[in-house]
Amino acid sequence: MLTAEQIESFKEQGFLKAQSALSAEDADRLRERMFDVIEGQSKGKAEAVRNMGNDQNVVVQIVNIWEADDLFRRHLFNPDITAMIAQLMGDDTVRVWHDQVQYKPPFVGGPTDWHQDHPYWPIIQPADLVSAWVALEDASVENGCMWMVPGSHLWGPHKGGTIGTNREDFSPAPDMSLLPEGTKIEPVPCEVKKGEVMFHHCLTWHGSPPNRSAHGRPAIAVHYMPGYTRYEKDPSKTHLVEHNVEVAPGEILKGSHFPTVRENGLALEA
């Protein structure tokens, strides 16, 4: 469980640095299963398995890997992680929006440009989601760990979530006219050891530079939503997983594709 000081820090900063979550052995097992999914050897099928970059800048993305592998499904229900998520969201019911693996292989791992998450999720409201990002190998500055901008979740959506990225030093390049006067943009690296979890708010600015090291950077992020999150239909926008929605616009988003992992303060089992 988190302390009151940690919860207050998250409210102010928009992220909370690494907390212990998995044993090294559990992280290794998930990493092995991740490669099974990438290689098409899993029992089930993920929503998507794709390279978000190119041959020189590879970022392998897997969406809803829990649908492909039972071990990842159990990970959604990790009672320690979901308890901390409930504390950070301030709600005693927690559901899964979707999960996402991002694997940056050695030497050719590509960048993930500066962005916010929620603007890329146009079918859900309000913007109160919290992501739990677990490293399956050490994520360091050397191999392209995430960077965060403290306090940026308080500035609202920025141009549909796209911040802009300075290619020379991989710093944010936002439209300053959209930010409060006197805003200070001071990115900080967020190194995460294997098996540790880092949390961030769905409006926090974040990005990660390329991985040119000899060490891969595999991680699993689960995007959790509070129990009051609604499905909002927008004819001009959609999302990869929208075809799985089983409720009407304006209703609470729940169903078999959006598992409830905590209900009324109690942890559920996979």
Image (spheres, helix red, strand yellow):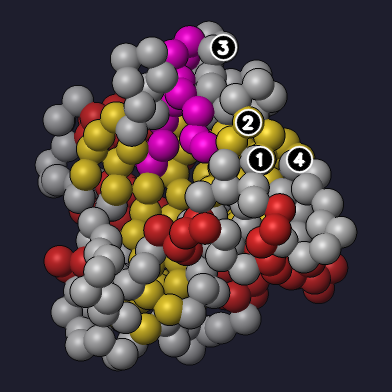
Q: Nearer the viewer, mark 4 or mark 3?
A: 4
Q: Is residue 55 left or right of residue 170?
A: left
For this view, does 221 lie left or right of residue 202?
left
Disc marking residue 172:
1
Residue at left offset 56%, top offset 65%: 157
- Per the rendered image, the range of residues in magenta is 101-113
Where residue 90 appears, as percent x and y from the top left, is 62, 81
* Residue sitting nearer the eye, 201 or 256: 201
- Tell whether 153 sits left or right of 160: right
**How far is disc 3 from disc 1 in space, using C-alphas?**
23 Å
Cα–Cα span, label 3 and label 2: 21 Å
1 or 2: tag closer to the N-terminus:
2
- List the residue tagged with mark 2: 166
195 or 161: nearer the eye? 161
**What amino acid type should be assigned to the residue bearing mark 1?**
Pro
Circle 3 sits on which residue? 213
Number of the label disc, if any, that sits on residue 188: 4
Amino acid bearing label 4 = Val
Residue 82 seen in the current view? no
Q: Considering the numbered disc 4 on the image, is that residue within a helix, a strand or a loop?
A: strand
Q: How many marks?
A: 4
Question: How far is the residue under mark 4 from the one under mark 3?
Answer: 20 Å
Measure the alpha-carbon separation of dots 1 and 2: 6 Å
Above or below, 3 against 35 in this view is below
